[in-house]
Image: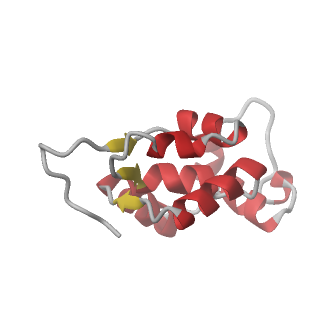
Amino acid sequence: MTDAVSNSTPVVLLPDAGPLITLAYGQALDLLLKPNWPVRIVDMVLHEVTRYSTPSSEAIHDWVEANRVSIMTTRTYHHYQAAKRVFLSPITAARSARVPFSSFWKVKAGSTPQQRLKGR
C-alpha cells in the first residue's frame, strides 16, 4: 500500500515511533486523522512498534489496519531485513528462542561482543 506523495498534498507522515507509541497509550491515535490529510507511516517505524506483542503494538497494528494507513517503503527497512537474514546475532537468536544468552557463548569477563564473535 505504498503511495507516491505529491509536493502539494499535505500529509501526516510518521517517521518516528515515539509519538505513535504515546498516542497509542493515550488511546488517541485517531487524532492523526483529524486534519483529514492522508496518513503514512514509515515501514521501519511500523516494524519497530509492532515487532513485540504489547498493548500499544496491538493498538497500533489494529489502527493501521482499520484506517488503511499507507506504508512508505524505505531502503533502511530493506537493509535491516537483509542484515537480519545474513547475520542473526546470538543475542537476537537467544531472545527469539527464549533461551539464556549464556548458552550461546561462554562469556569471559570484560570481553566485548565483537571479541566473542572473533573467537567463534
Quadrant of the image containing the C terminus? bottom right
Q: Residue at x 43, y 60 (%)?
A: 69
The number of numbered discs placed on residues in the rendered structure image is: 0
Q: Residue at x 71, y 39 (%)?
A: 25
Reply above or below: 44 against 32.
Answer: below
Q: Quadrant of residue 22?
A: top right
In the picture provided, is 100 more to the left or to the right than 14? right
Q: Quadrant of residue 12?
A: top left
Q: Residue at x 63, y 40 (%)?
A: 28
Quadrant of the image containing the N terminus? bottom left
Please state which of residues 10 and 116 is positioned toward the viewer in this rendering.
10
Please state which of residues 7 and 31 is positioned toward the viewer in this rendering.
31
Please state which of residues 117 and 101 is positioned toward the viewer in this rendering.
101
Reply above or below: 70 against 109.
Answer: below
Reply above or below: 14 against 74.
Answer: above
Residue 98 percent coordinates (x, y) = 84, 62
